[in-house]
Image: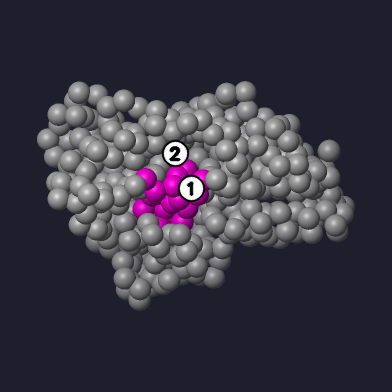
Amino acid sequence: MGRRGLIWLLAFVSLLVAFFGGFELRSRPVEGPGAAQAATIRQQVLQALQQSYYLPLSPAALHAHGVRGVLNALHDPYTRYLSPHAYQLVVTEEESRYVGVGLAVERGVGALRVTATLPGLPAASAGIRAGDTITQIGSVSLRKVRYARAADMLQGPVGSHVTLVVHGRGGARSVTLQRAVVDLPGVYRRNIRYHGGVYTYLRLPGIVRGVGARVRALAERAASKHRAGLILDLRGDGGGLLDEAVNVADVFQDSGVVVAIHGLHEPTHIYSADDRAVDNLPLVVLVDGTTASAAEVVAGSLQRAHRAIVVGTRSFGKGTVQALRPLTGGGALKLTVATFSLAGGERVNRRGIRPNIRAVDRPGTRADEVLRAALRVLAAA
């Protein structure tokens, strides 16, 4: 089946807190409750799992009490019930918009670690930077607070305020930020001069709708201006839309398998490059431990095709695909429907993408050593 034959849709609400930090590859929605509207939520959840879950259900899941019991028996952190409010937030993601302060965060030890900020938004304007840690939200210390709850605490209505205790190079400080509607850009671009060459740098916060076309336009522009190479920064990119991941890989990969999808109820789908590559630009892809899912499709495909050198640290290793099942009452079930593999059957789940060149930032400095390593690679190409 052609890759345009499926529309792969968004699926994880925590990405609203850490813009595109949700470690998700999003699949088309599965069919809603229909005639089963009178069924309990537990019955609807079980029906959806029996019809679409990527593995056979265990007896423990089939006989567990309540929705929470059923989902806990799966031992799958990516299959969960979304409340009506959470589901509506997920729907909002389709427009690449959310309410927040422009922070991307990940789990830290008794804290949230900032992985990125969006320029011009409250967090960046207050001087919060990648590498800072948040140890308190409002009056609540995060020392014993679960990540999901801490992430929820960053959310709130437009115009409301949130006070954070932030630790950075200058020590600890208290910062009060006003939440706003954030329109998420698909690509950040800038040119970097290094050792006499000019290189195009593209950073993707998430694999959102339209990002493939944007990357193609910028890559073609770089090639037409005879740039010395291109850096595709996927650090902090927690995933997104499968079709768009294939579109991004297509920009640089001229042939071969990009990704294959496998599931108990999903026939295998193989997505291949379409021979329209911008192939005259040396390419480096940057990854780290927060590069996940759809972003791993891009990095892994380009690495396997020998089209890019991957620099950084091993990626997150999330190789499963989720879909949404709307339920009565306004909520939804997000469930795992498939796994994915790269060319040659290489699996990503729990393995991640291993970089060709390992590079890490030095503690106590804001210098981007990973980017410097990428520039050295390109300068030597």
Residue extending furthest toward the left: 65
Residue at 39 percent across and 28 percent down: it is 264
- Please report contact status of discs 2 and 1: CB closer than 8 Å, yes or no: yes
Q: Quadrant of the N terminus?
A: top right
The residue beneath circle 2 is 321
Residue extending furthest toward the bottom: 159
The image shows residue 269 at horizontal and vertical percentages of 54, 34
- Camera-side residue of 264 and 206: 264
Hey, what amino acid is under mark 1? Answer: Trp
Hey, what amino acid is under mark 2? Answer: Val
The span shown in magenta is: 6-30
Q: Principal SS element in the magenta part? A: loop
Q: Nearer the viewer, mark 2 or mark 1?
A: 1
Classify residue 337 as left or right of residue 309.
left
In terms of sequence position, does the residue under pointer 2 or pointer 1 come before the other?
1
Instruction: Give the class, few, some or many, for how many residues have Cα within 10 Å of label 1's Cα (few <14, many ≥20).
Output: many
Does 73 sit above or below residue 114?
above
Q: Secondary structure at mark 2?
A: strand
Which image quarter: residue 320?
Answer: top left
The residue beneath circle 1 is 8
Instruction: Give the class, few, some or many, for how many residues have Cα within 10 Å of label 2's Cα (few <14, many ≥20).
Output: many
Does 4 sit above or below residue 360?
below
The image shows residue 376 at horizontal and vertical percentages of 77, 41
**Residue 236 appears in view:** no
